Amino acid sequence: MNPNDDDLSALLQSHATRHRAGPGLQARVRSRILLAGLRDAAGHLVDSTHPRPARWPAWVAGFALGVTVTLGVAPWVQQFEQDRSLAAGVLASHVRSLGSGPLVEVASSDRHTVKPWFQGRLDYAPPVADLADADFPLLGGRVETLAGNRVAGLAYAHRKHIINVFVWPDARQSPLTRAPVRGFNTLQWSDGRMRFRVISDLDAAELDRFGDTLRTRTAPP
Amino acid sequence: MSAARRFERLVLPHLDAAYNLARWLLADRAAAEDAVQEAALRAFRYFDSAREETVRSWFLGIVRNTCFSHLESTRNRQELGGYDEATLDAAHVAAGHSAPEPGRIVAGRQARAQIDAALRALPPPLREVIVLRELEGLEYAEIARIAAIPVGTVMSRLARARERLRASLGTVGSEP
């Protein structure tokens, strides 16, 4: 090799810009691959890079409507009914997110990308925890409407299962309760600042582990 | 999910190299990020056909193909057309590059800007091989696999790229 080639190499290697994929890009790629993997496993599209208006499969809308209609409107069951319709909303939202989607509007496994995304879209800052080391990677977030309110929806994954977490401000502390709904497992609790509702087709034991990990990582200081 | 995890373990370590190549081929940061994401998804689709020993060149090959497709669709075809060796030679001669001025030193803070500009001025097929060789430190054989060209072509394109860079930058003479 001509000595000038060595000098030129040295110049290029010392001075030319070597671009590096930032953490944002890495997180987006990671999330997209996870979603693609889940899509393959689930057999239908769960990924959406562009937010779409919600399109409910007919049977889901019918189910949610059916639950609301069969409940009475007597005031003394108002609290119970509110919880039932909220539960129906959580279920419908979960199923819709897995079906016509979108599962996430911001697809990133990086909580430092997902949390700020909600700014301007919600009037509160939802806690977004990183649970990847516990094998519950974050897939991303979206804005959901539950019982007429806009709330944060966070999607996590565990193996082939998707876990949806809905979280909104609620100062009434309440202990953890578990409830199976139509074959899905659900958890709910409030830590005195935020209310969490979790739903997944994950088995109860694993969902408990998810819930424990999430509660620990989002506990008020 | 094991396919996704295996993909993460084998392919994601090459994301920096992928992004660097995409940035040098596409210039625009947003386009480069899009290309890398698209390439990653495409690679995941075809992950079954990847062999562990050659994952890096396989993945970078998908990245450069994605970038060249993007270049073809967004630029005047003529700019890209006919990147065979004869055309590259003819263009080089026509541009009238003279021998480099000895002793014109590239130094200091301006060095990066000057060198980046000189790299950018190379046509994409020459820029691609010099980036893979000098910035990623890859062997000729691997560059050949990535760009889907014979090793001989890699070496002749490198020689041409170096000639043009020397013409743009001058040379740092060996200090006495």
Image (cartoon, rainbow, N blue to C red):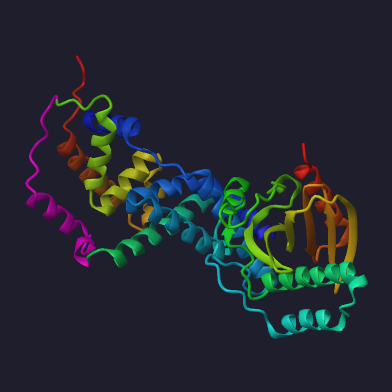
Looking at the image, which residue is at 30% across and 34% down?
A12
Instruction: Locate residue B76: give its quadrant.
Output: bottom left
B119 sits to left or right of A118:
left
A160 sits to left or right of B90:
right
Asked if residue A92 is among those painted magenta in the image, a careful observer would answer no
Q: Would you place residue A79 above or below residue A107 in this image?
A: below
- Image location of residue A158, percent across then percent down: 74, 57
> How many labels, in total?
0
Instruction: Locate residue B13: give its quadrant.
Output: top right
Is residue A90 or residue A208 the one in the foreground? A90
Q: Is residue A158 visible?
A: no
Q: Residue furthest right?
A: A76
Is residue B9 or residue A113 the one in the foreground? A113
Please report the bounds of the magenta region as a residue range. B77-103
Q: Residue furthest top?
A: B176
Looking at the image, which residue is at 33% across and 54% down?
B26
Quadrant location, the C terminus of chain B: top left
- Image location of residue B138, percent across then percent down: 41, 42
- Image location of residue A162, percent across then percent down: 73, 63
B31 sits to left or right of B123:
right
Is residue A75 or residue A6 the one in the foreground? A75
Quadrant location, the N terminus of chain B: bottom right
Q: Is residue A215 visible?
A: yes
Q: Residue furthest front?
A: A75
Instruction: Locate residue B158: give its quadrant.
Output: top left
Asked if residue B92 is among those painted magenta in the image, a careful observer would answer yes
Q: Would you place residue A127 above or below residue A97 in this image?
A: above
